[in-house]
Image: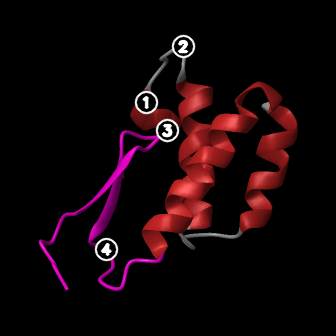
Amino acid sequence: MRERLGNDEHAAEEISYRSAYNAKKGHFSLKVVDPILRIFKEYELEIRCMMKVAELEQRCLYLPSAWAYPKPRATQMICRLHKTE
């Protein structure tokens, strides 16, 4: 992620958000998020918001249809694959 984001001043923030989001979606262990929360206390609220967004998206019956936006403070969830059931 660091390579992809470059030397952006908000890279650490973005990496912490994406890591928490992807861990909650099940792509890797949630144990990875614990050290991130300890190191980046100032981002804790947003990290927890991203984890909640991922949790809600995972409830979708038609994965990966659900997409919440805007992240990290999502106010809407849409179905990207146009499933209406």
Farthest residue, direction right? 38
Using the rendered view, name the quadrant where residue 81 is placed.
bottom left
Q: Does 12 appear above or below 44?
A: above
On the picture, is 62 further left or further right than 28? left
Q: Residue shown at 43%/44% (left/top)? A: 74
Which percent across, then down, holds residue 8?
48, 17
- In the picture, the quarter occupied by the C terminus is bottom left
What residue type is disc 4 on? Pro
Q: Residue shown at 56%/48% (left/top)? A: 50
Q: Which of marks 2 and 3 is nearer the N terminus?
A: 2
Q: Nearer the viewer, mark 2 or mark 3?
A: 3
Residue underneath mark 4: 64
Q: Nearer the viewer, mark 1 or mark 4?
A: 4
What residue type is disc 2 on? Glu
Using the rendered view, name the quadrant where residue 51 is placed.
bottom right
Residue underneath mark 3: 73
Residue underneath mark 1: 5
Q: Which of marks 3 and 4 is nearer the N terminus?
A: 4
Farthest residue, direction top? 9
Farthest residue, direction left? 82
Q: Does 41 appear above or below 53?
A: above
Residue underneath mark 2: 9
Using the rendered view, name the quadrant where residue 23 is placed.
bottom right
Residues in magenta, as a range: 59-85
For label 4, the SS is loop
Question: How many other residues sit within 10 Å of disc 1, few (<14), some (14-19) or many (≥20)?
Answer: few
Q: Nearer the viewer, mark 1 or mark 3?
A: 3
Give the CA distance from mark 1 to mark 3.
Answer: 21 Å
